[in-house]
Image: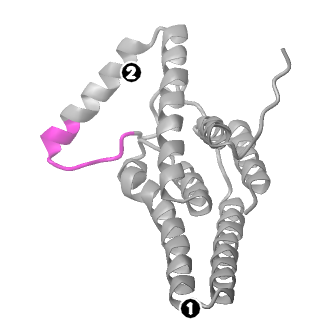
Amino acid sequence: MDIQILLVFALVCAVSDLRTRLIPNTLMLCGFLWALLDRFVMAVNVCQAASSSGSVLSACSGAIVILADGLAGFLLPWILLGCLAALKMFGGADVKLLSVIGLQLGLKDCFLVMVYSLFTAAAISAVIVIRQRSLVVRLTYFYRYLVSVMAGNKLTAYRSGDEDQSAEFSFALPVLIALLTVLITKGTIETNIIV
């Protein structure tokens, strides 16, 4: 997936999440297939470049590294955030979005996107809680959840669907902001700022 296509994909996901609070699985599947195809094309290009120099072993090892990096980037969001998604503390579509980004960018950049998106989301959450003056309500809800989990000795879904959802927001937007930040800091996207 070219970086431009990845950005368009993330933008479409963010717009869908903002408008409908959903990111369609068909969109995720298209992004996944495109990123997977791009990974294979990168691996083949490395094989061809290395085999033309006569080193079959380095051709195979270079392709394996490229494919392994994409797989690791794809799995990282599931490993770190999958449990939160299962408990409904985090959106499953957001984990899928991060996985597609990880497949395209690889492990290191996926981790950076995840960290930056969590910090961006925390800042957005803080603004929402301050504006709504709902810190006590949020902390009380979290406290009740912890008490119910400890009393029942089992994990249950954090959100049941009947609680106040006014402080919720679309996480795909912080992911898009984080993706732009990572790509700009890497120099993948050049910015021309006119003063």
In the rendered image, residue 176 lying in the magenta stretch gets the answer no
Label 2 is placed on what type of residue? Arg
Label 1 is placed on what type of residue? Val
Quarter-wise, where is residue 49 in the image?
Answer: bottom right
- According to the picture, the residue beneath numbered tag 2 turns out to be 138
Q: Position of residue 22 (x, y in %)?
A: 65, 47
From this viewpoint, is residue 86 visible? no
Q: Position of residue 73 (x, y in %)?
A: 50, 60
Looking at the image, which residue is at 48% across and 15% down?
129
Dividing the image into 4 quarters, which one contains the C terminus?
A: top right
Compare residues 1 and 46 and report the one nearer the observer: 46
Compare residues 136 and 43 and report the one nearer the observer: 43
Compare residues 91 and 53 and report the one nearer the observer: 53
Q: Residues within 10 Å of mark 2 (few under 14, many from 20)?
A: few
In the displayed structure, 22 sits above or below 121; it is below
Q: Secondary structure at mark 2?
A: helix
Looking at the image, which residue is at 68% across and 42% down?
187
Q: Which residues are magenta?
A: 148-158
Q: Position of residue 171 (x, y in %)?
A: 57, 38
Q: Is residue 194 left or right of residue 75?
A: right
- According to the picture, the residue beneath numbered tag 1 turns out to be 56
Q: Position of residue 85 (x, y in %)?
A: 43, 50
